[in-house]
Structures are given as structure tokens and as C-alpha cells.
Image (cartoon, rainbow, N blue to C red):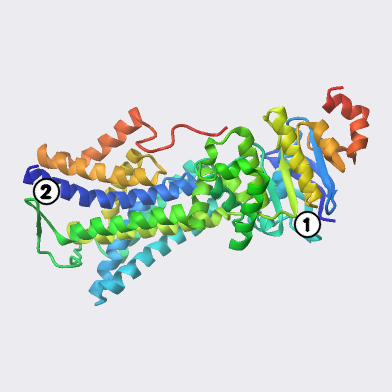
Amino acid sequence: MMLEVEGLDSHYGRIPALRGIDLHVGEGELVALVGANGAGKTTLLRALSGVQPVSAGRVRFEGADITAAAADRRVQLGIVQVPEGRQVFGPLSVEDNLRLGAYLRSRAEAALGIERVYAMFPALKQKRREPAGTLSGGQQQMLAMGRGLMALPKLLLLDEPSMGLAPKLVEEIFACVRALKTASTTIFLVDQNARAALAVADRAYVLETGRVVLSGSGAELLEDEQVKEAYLGL
Amino acid sequence: MSAQFMQYLLTGLTVGAIYALVALGFSIIFNASHVINFAQGEFVMIGGMTTVTLTAAGLPYLLAIPLAIAAAALVGLALEKFAVEPARGASVITLIIITIGASIFLRGLAMVIWDKRFHALKPFTGDTPIAIGGATVLPQSLWVIGVTLAIVLALSWFFGRTLLGKAMLATSHNRLAAQLVGINVRMVLFLSFGLSAALGAVAGILIAPITTTSYDVGVMLGLKGFASAILGGLGSGVGAVVGGLVLGIAETMSAGYISSAYKDAIAFVIILAVLFFMPSGLFGKRGSERV
């Protein structure tokens, strides 16, 4: 099992954000997490990346307990997050953003990674010298994905990769997610676009007010009456 | 250009270069933590006073200066480790108050370790004035300007070309994203304090042969450096340098043409004017840019 989460709790001050989260992600799986705004999806991903404190429970990665590991240690191990809202380093160039993605990787790995990202997103290569802040929203999302891939993720955490993008770009992003899955990257995907996320996922969890309330294969959940009503608008 | 004007300009550049170094220290720590480190002036004092002690003990400049810079850097690192780091998670205001406390503590400690007298350092290379365009300039002034220039170039190389420098910049722009690419942001803050302290110490050593040094020399130099950083835009490297030079020149010009009594007031007038009319300074980021 690549990632195992047991009884995870997290709080913002005294307000609980996650309560007793149990879930797992197997090697090579694409697992989706759906839920309404404020359900705790982003909090969960941040807790997995070690940038949100947890108050109870444990997280295991490839069998090792990483509940107390620092954020940079987790990146080193291969847990890499592409955060919500892209969060590119605005004033730095596109290429510097990518290079920093491989901050904990060797020079050779970084050079190889940059070529791979440029092959995947040719638009970024054209803009390599421009400040990342001047890119369009879609290009910034590609840059954020590219920066994540630079860290050579074993487990890629994608937080709302299609948020705020035009439909055509959403398709492009999901095509990229499928391509990554084909290349056997393990992916944990959070997306407000529940239909697209469930369609592409092997399995999925439904999060409501900080709890996992439902889980199953992507196809099962797409057919689930509750899910249909709450998240698919049917 | 009159000889008098030239004279004021050269003096202003010398003083301004020192302010620029202090301002760079403010900006580097501000970038890493959004904290204004009011102990920055104390690093200036530690640099100068340690050099005084080491040279008095018979060490040549070539040895005394690097040791003094290292001593100040160690104090900076210790300040981060034992005063700022334990308050991790506290508000920025709390951290700023901690630095004010640290500055009072360090000044008191310096008074106990050394004394309350003024100490002069020998100029690095003699004190025969050099004539430039009708004005005269001390060799030490050239040292001040030259070393500052070299440091500015080295810093722009560091932040523009090295991975660690870019990681420090990235941390200041987006701390969360920096953590998510694996940058140890606590280490960045730690390094920032060391680097800022070293810069402050260099300023203190360079200026000591011209203005002498004492346990409380950091109060005024710290404030002037702070004014320069505000003028240039807190967090901007270019701003710190330009702000320092502008403030230095404005001070000597007003001392020369108006009255030296108002020299120190200039810095405070500048702080007030900038805060009223241009809060982000000459080169600062305008407002918040979070999307």
C-alpha cells in the first residue's frame, strides 16, 4: 500500500476540520476525493503534505510512519502536491519555477525533468524566460503541474487542478492526469468537477464536514443516488 | 559642479553605502519572515566593536575582520535559534517585539562586555585624502563604496543565479508553495538572520574608522537603515540600495546647505513622508498580489 491514513484529525484552532479520516491509496491507483466546499479536502491534502498540523491519527507512506515528518522530508520521499490556486512563484521565471520544483533532486534529474515538462507543455518552453505571474491561468496551472512533476513524485496530490479554467483547458488538464496515470504515477485527486474526477478515477472517497461518508469505485459512485444528487447536480 | 557640491555628494555616497548595507539586512529578514528585525543595528555595533577588540589584541585586519563578521553572524543565527524560532507561529507583531527586546539586550550586553566609550579603528589604508574634482575623499570612503558595490554584486549573483538564493526568494513570495517543493523554510529564515547579521557587521566595520564606534552606535545606524529600506520599499534589494544612497546624500546635502542640526531629522521626515504618500516605497510590491 502506498499511502495509508488512519483516524486522522486536524483542527483550525478549536474548530475541527478533519475527523477520523481513514483512507488508502494503492500503488499506481488514481483515487479521487470529492466533496462540497469546506468539507476539508484541501485541509486533508495539506495534512498529507505536512503543512497542516494533525491532532490525532497516523499517516503511513510505503509502510513507514510519516505522521510527524516535516514537509521537505515528505517531498524527498516522493509525496508531491500541486496546490489549489496554482501558487506559482510569480516574479520568478517559468524556468526558475520548474528548477525549484526539483529543489531536492540532483542537477541531472532537474535537467531531464525540465525537458520532459517542456515536451508535455510546449507553451511553457516558449515562455521559459517570462515571469510566471504573467502567464494565463491555464498556463499557470500547467506550470504548477510541471513544477510538481519536477520533484519526481511517487504520489502526486492534485488539489483542484481544473478550478477556474475554461472547459477546453479542463479537458487538457484531465488528459494530462490520464497520461500521468498511464505512466503509472499514483495520483490522489481533489476536484470540484466531481463528474470528471469520478470518471477518471479508479476509486473515490466522498468527504462531508471533515468525515469520509462514502467510498467506492469511480463508476459506482457516479451511479450512486446520493452522490448524483449532492455533487453531480442530477 | 561646485567643489562643495562634489564634496557633499562623495560624503553622502559613503554614508549612503553604509545605510544601504543595513537596509539590505532589513530586507533579507523581512523577505524570509515579514519581520522587521530591530536588532539589525546591533549587528552593525557587534561588527565594529569586535574588530576594535581583536585589533587591539594585536590581530591584523585580515584576520580580525573575518572573525568579527563571523561573530556577528553567529549572534544573528543564535538570535533566530533561541529567540525567534521558539516563537514560531506567533504573530509578526510578537516577533518584531522580540527583536526589539533582543536589541536592548544586545546593547546592554555590549555595554557590560566593552564599555561606554567611543572607539576608533585605524583606516584600512592610511588617511591621506585623495582629491577628486575639487573635493577630497578619504581612502576609507573608497573602501566603503567599493566593498558595498562588491557586496551588492555578490548578492545579486546569489539571489539571481544560485538555487539556494532562488529558494530564498521563492520562500518570500510564496511560503506555502516553497514548502510544497521541499524548501526547508525554517532553514531559510535561519540563513537570513546569519546573512543579515554579516551584512550589518560589514557596515559597522567599514564605517568605524570614519565615525568611530561604541556600544550604542547601532541605534542610529539601525534607524537610518530602516528608513532607507522603507524608502526603497521593504523587501526590495534594489530599493534598499537606492534608498540608502538617497538618504545618505539627502542627509549630507541638508547638513551642508541648510544646517547640520537637521541632519538626523531627514531620515525621520523621509519615513513619515513615505508612509503617508507612498507606503510601498520606491521599488516595493504594491498592495497584496494574492489571487
Amino acid carrying mark 1 in the image: Phe
In the image, A57 versus A175, the foreground residue is A175
Q: Nearer the viewer, mark 2 or mark 1?
A: 2
Total marks placed = 2
- Whether residue A40 is visible here, answered yes or no, is yes
In terms of secondary structure, where does tag 1 sit? Answer: strand
Residue B7 coordinates in the image, percent (x, y) = 11, 48
Label 1 Cα neighbours within 10 Å, binned few <14 / some 14-19 / many ≥20: many
User: What residue appears at the point 29 percent right and 71 percent down from the top-left corner?
Assistant: B64
Residue that numbered label 1 is attached to: A61
Location of mark 2 (residue): B7
Residue A150 relative to residue B75: left or right:
right
- Nearest the camera: A57 or B147? B147
x then y, percent, for residue A70? 65, 56
* Foreground residue among B284 and A121: A121
Residue A55 in view in this figure: no
User: Residue A68, located in which quarter of the rendered image?
Assistant: bottom right
Q: Quadrant of residue B97?
A: top left
Image quadrant containing the C terminus of chain B: top right
- Amino acid at circle 2: Gln
Q: Please name the residue shown 7% across and 46% down the image.
A: B3
Residue sitting at x 30%, y 49%: B20
Q: Position of residue A37 (x, y in %)?
A: 74, 30
Residue B166 spot, x, y in % from top left: 50, 52
Q: Nearer the viewer, residue A48 or A199?
A: A199
- Hey, which residue is sitting farthest bottom in the picture? B58
Which chain's residue wears label 1?
A
Residues at discs 2 and 1 in contact (Cβ within 8 Å)? no
Give the residue at x 76% y 32%.
A192
Which quadrant is home to the N terminus of chain B? top left
For numbered disc 2, what is the local secondary structure?
A: helix
